[in-house]
Image: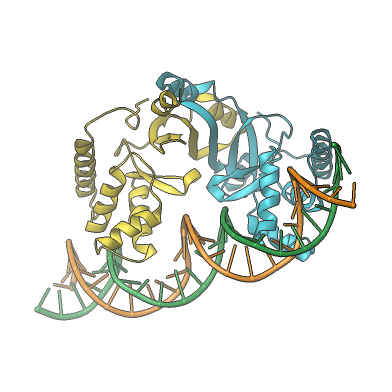
Chain colours: A yellow, B cyan, C orange, D green
DNA sequence: TTGAGTATGTGATAGTATAACGTACCGCAT
DNA sequence: ATGCGGTACGTTATACTATCACATACTCAA
């Protein structure tokens, strides 16, 4: 598992590369990577944090890119639908995908102290839940896995 | 894993026993199992389904047990706090606990066709997520695990 | 019986999300 | 170049989810 969210890294590059990757992918697929969608992705990439739709909307409003909730929700829906962002159900908020392009089953580690969110990959077919579900004949199509706790940095700071 | 939610069973007993168990537990611990709280638990036990707070509130209103949102939310908070019910984040709704009393890390299997929800037990220390988190030094305090898909009954019906 | 803690009643409001409708733009086949 | 279908955007309104704040009432034990 990677832990981009917790480790130090070149964050400027993180944003540029993230946007470039999505831009390329959209070109390939013929999806429209419009200014609003691009800006929302940038906002999400700015911190490894989940942002609420209305936080996003406030920023868009300041920048004259839209002022009503559907503007933000549509852009977020687009990003989530194509795997460029994820919704954190626990927080009713959204975060940029750390591994865009790969079709995956993400899991999240949410620090309750600094709100940083790290994304991990899970293979639902492995592990106990997948095995149990298979035994029962339950077909898992999608899973929400969100762990809340203390990240290493905040744990050290507390000690 | 048990699959009470999907298997045929004596559902009347299911409700009676559920309420009796919680009743006993509250007596032991000195918690007040008030009429509203009892009724909300009964409503949740009526189906192995998640109910929204406002569905609950509607029922309470019909029965003269309360008419404003805080009435429902307070009762739900009580039940969730003591492990008698769980919140399904994916659905913004609530479900009676299938294993009341035991302190546990629940996981849910949600059928997208019939809305039945089955509760499984997970030990977060085991499995990939727990292991990865431990490697990173992330301390998991609570986890939301909600799988969505098709239950055996609906899968068979579809075929 | 009185006081602390807990539970409820109620009105107001905050926060999250979508419906519904019209307009504008883009690529393409005619 | 014209018309057409698909996609995206603008805007108003509304639905759904959750909490705040304050007054009142109940419960238990000192």
Q: Quadrant of the N terminus of chain A?
A: top left
Looking at the image, which residue is at 22% across and 52% down? A30
Residue B14: % across, % down? 80, 41
Q: Which residue is more in the foreground, B33 or C3?
A: C3
Q: Is residue D7 above or below residue B150?
A: below
Task: Tell me the quarter of the picture where residue C20 sits.
Answer: bottom left
Residue B62: % across, % down? 76, 65
Residue A40: % across, % down? 29, 52
Q: Which residue is more in the foreground, C10 or D7?
A: C10
Looking at the image, which residue is at 84% across and 39% down? B20
Q: Is residue B118 visible?
A: yes
Task: Tell me the quarter of the picture where residue B143 sits.
Answer: top right
Q: Is residue D3 above or below residue B24?
A: below
Residue A48: % across, % down? 33, 38
Task: Tell me the quarter of the picture where residue B72 sits.
Answer: bottom right
Q: Is residue B83 left or right of residue A146?
A: right
Looking at the image, which residue is at 34% across and 59% down? A58
| Count of numbered tags | 0
Q: Which residue is more in the foreground, B68 or B131?
A: B68
Q: Is residue A40 left or right of residue B100?
A: left
Q: Is residue B46 visible?
A: no
Q: Quadrant of the C terminus of chain A?
A: top left
């Amino acid at each position: 598992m990677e832990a981009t969210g917790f480790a130090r890294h070149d964050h400027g590059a993180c944003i540029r590369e993230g946007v470039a990757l999505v831009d390329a992918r959209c070109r390939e697929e013929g999806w429209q990577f419009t200014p609003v969608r691009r800006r929302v992705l940038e906002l999400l990439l700015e911190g490894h944090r989940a942002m609420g739709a209305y936080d996003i909307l406030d920023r868009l409003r300041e920048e004259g890119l839209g002022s009503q909730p559907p503007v933000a929700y549509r852009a977020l829906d687009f990003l989530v639908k194509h795997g460029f962002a994820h919704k954190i159900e626990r927080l009713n908020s959204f975060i940029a995908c750390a591994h865009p392009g790969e079709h995956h089953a993400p899991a999240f580690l949410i620090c309750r102290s600094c709100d940083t969110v790290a994304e991990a990959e899970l293979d639902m077919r492995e592990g106990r839940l997948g095995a149990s579900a298979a035994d029962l004949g339950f077909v898992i199509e999608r899973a929400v896995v969100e762990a809340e706790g203390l990240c290493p940095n905040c744990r050290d700071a507390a000690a």
